Amino acid sequence: MDYLEYYKLSEHPFSNVVDSRFYYNSPQQSEAIIKLKYAVDTMKGLAVVIGNIGAGKTTLARRLLEELDEEHYEAALLVIIHSSVSSEWLFKKFAMQLGVKHISENKLELLGEIYKRLNEISEEGKRAVVLMDEVQMLNSKEIMEEFRGLLNMESSEGKMVNFIFFGLPELDQVLSLDEPLKQRVASRIRLTAYSEENTGEYIRHRLQVAGCSSNQIFTDQAIRMIFRYSNGIPRLINTICDNALLEGFLNKREVIDETIIRNVAIDLGLDTQGS
């Protein structure tokens, strides 16, 4: 027996792996989706989402991608995994994601193919959207200038391609490497931590999706302490809750109270006063 069976759950509710089924549509996330879709639909060109580590940027990016249906959008998500990315690599990735069939090794020819493909997408009545996660890693003036060049591709309706950058607060400094590009940011969204009320709703939502039939596995006092130790950061909320369920199972506790949360926080190094 593990804690799933003990608490009558069908699956782990607090995994930090992005899973759209567990998406919590908080007021903040809902507003962000509306603003980003507006920027895309009106072909503004560039929107930026900034948030601290664990604030839910990747979750929001994947949710937005799901909402951009294939009938009206040619959309792709590109995750930057290292800082040594070249502009040539980026152009090839853009071309592949947008459906360019001939990926030329010549940069100018590739740009021409991208422009041709963007025209095709426009003629199909669709919007071209490229979502990019962890953009702060592209700490290069050259690459920022390349983005500006791509945003110069316009039709009578607006920008031919829409970029949505997701990144840590350092992304502001990266955009500043090319001031004209920074001035083209049409929408800027900052993801903040959850409130105590949202933290409780988030926890109950994920438990419900995981098949929880109990009214309350976590006491109100436990949720208050989870908020305190996590500062409302979704990734930390997940980590604390997952460890708390395991701790509760090992100690055969039917509900998770503040004592369990405090012990978990100490084990995770989140409560230095308690250690």
Image: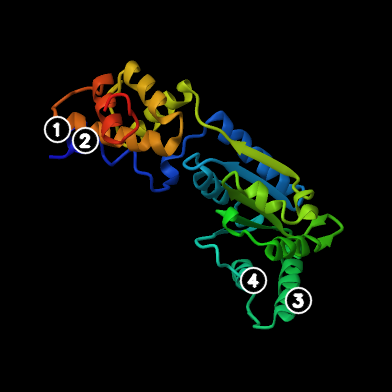
Q: Amino acid type of disc 2?
A: Leu
Can residue 133 be seen?
Answer: no
Residue pictured at 84% horizontal, 60% vertical? 155
State how far apart marks 4 and 2 are (Cα).
46 Å
State how far apart marks 1 and 2 are (Cα).
6 Å
Q: Which residue, given by chain and number where applicable, does mark 4 sit on?
A: 95
State how far apart marks 1 and 3 are (Cα).
62 Å
Closer to the observer: label 1 or label 3? 1
Q: Which residue, given by chain and number where applicable, does mark 1 sit on?
A: 250
Q: Which residue, given by chain and number where applicable, does mark 2 sit on?
A: 246
State how far apart marks 3 and 4 are (Cα).
10 Å
Residue pictured at 70% horizontal, 66% vertical? 142
Q: Could you tell which of marks 3 and 4 lies nearer the N-terminus?
A: 4
Closer to the observer: label 4 or label 1? 1
Residue lying farthest to the bottom in this orientation: 105
Labels 1 & 2 near each other (Cβ < 8 A): yes
Closer to the camera in the image, 185 or 82? 82
Residue 78 versus residue 103 in the image, above or below: above
Q: Amino acid type of disc 3?
A: Gly
Q: Could you tell which of marks 4 and 1 lies nearer the N-terminus?
A: 4
Q: Which mark is residue 112?
A: 3
Q: Could you tell which of marks 1 and 3 lies nearer the N-terminus?
A: 3
